[in-house]
Image (spheres, grey):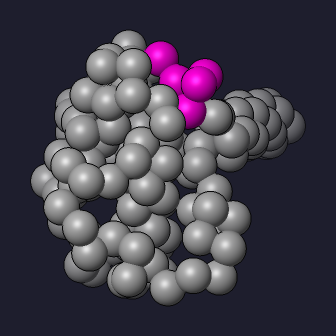
C-alpha cells in the first residue's frame, strides 16, 4: 500500500511540475488569445500562471517601475499592463499573500483581455 501511495504522490508531483513548467513559459503579446486569458472565476492560480507568462524584470531592464506606471491604465501599452500584473503577483508572493488586492489584479487582467480583443498588441 505504501508503494501505491508513493506512486500516486509521484504522479501528482509530476503533474504539478508539468503545469508549473507550462505556466512559466513566456508568451509574447502576438501569441495572446483573448479566450485563453483567465476569467475572474475565483481561481487565483490561473491569474498567477498568466502573470508569469510575461517577464516583467526583463521588460523593466533595471528601471524603477514606480516612474513607469504612474499613468492611468488607459495610457499604458499591453506590455506595460502585463508588466504591472507581473509585479503585483510577485509583490503578493514576497508579502506572503498578506496584502493581495485580487479585485485590482482581476481588473488588470480584464484590461489586458480588452487590449487583446481590440488587437492592440503593441
- The quadrant in which the N terminus is found is top right
- Closer to us: 6 or 20: 20
Residue 97, can we see it? Answer: yes
Whether residue 45 is visible? no
Q: Is residue 25 left or right of residue 33?
A: right
User: Which is nearer the eye, 27 or 43?
Assistant: 27
Residue 12 against residue 77 in the figure, above or below: above
For the image, the number of numbered tags is 0
Residue found 57% across the figure and 82% down from its top: 63
Q: Quadrant of residue 27?
A: top right
Please say whether residue 57 is one of the residues in the magenta stretch. Answer: no
Q: Residue at x 14, y 53 (%)?
A: 103
Q: Position of residue 113 (x, y in %)?
A: 31, 29
Whether 37 is drawn above or below 88: the answer is above
Q: Residue at (71%, 39%) from the top-left corner?
A: 25
User: Where's residue 67, x and y in %?
Assistant: 38, 83
Left or right of residue 89, residue 57 in this image = right
In the picture, residue 69 is in which quadrant?
bottom left
Which residues are the magenta region? Answer: 29-33
Residue 20 in percent (x, y) is at 67, 43
**Along the horizontal axis of the image, is 55 left or right of 65?**
right
3 or 46, which is in the foreground? 46
Amino acid at each position: 500500500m505504501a508503494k501505491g501511495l508513493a506512486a500516486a504522490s509521484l504522479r501528482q508531483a509530476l503533474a504539478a511540475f508539468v503545469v508549473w513548467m507550462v505556466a512559466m513559459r513566456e508568451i509574447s503579446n502576438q501569441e495572446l488569445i483573448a479566450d485563453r486569458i483567465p476569467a475572474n472565476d475565483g481561481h487565483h492560480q490561473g491569474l498567477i500562471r498568466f502573470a508569469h507568462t510575461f517577464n516583467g524584470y526583463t521588460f523593466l531592464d533595471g528601471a524603477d517601475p514606480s516612474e513607469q506606471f504612474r499613468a492611468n491604465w488607459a495610457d499604458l501599452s499591453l506590455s506595460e499592463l502585463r508588466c504591472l500584473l507581473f509585479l503585483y503577483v510577485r509583490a503578493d508572493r514576497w508579502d506572503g499573500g498578506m496584502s493581495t488586492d485580487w479585485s485590482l489584479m482581476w481588473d488588470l487582467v480584464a484590461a489586458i483581455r480588452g487590449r487583446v480583443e481590440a488587437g492592440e498588441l503593441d
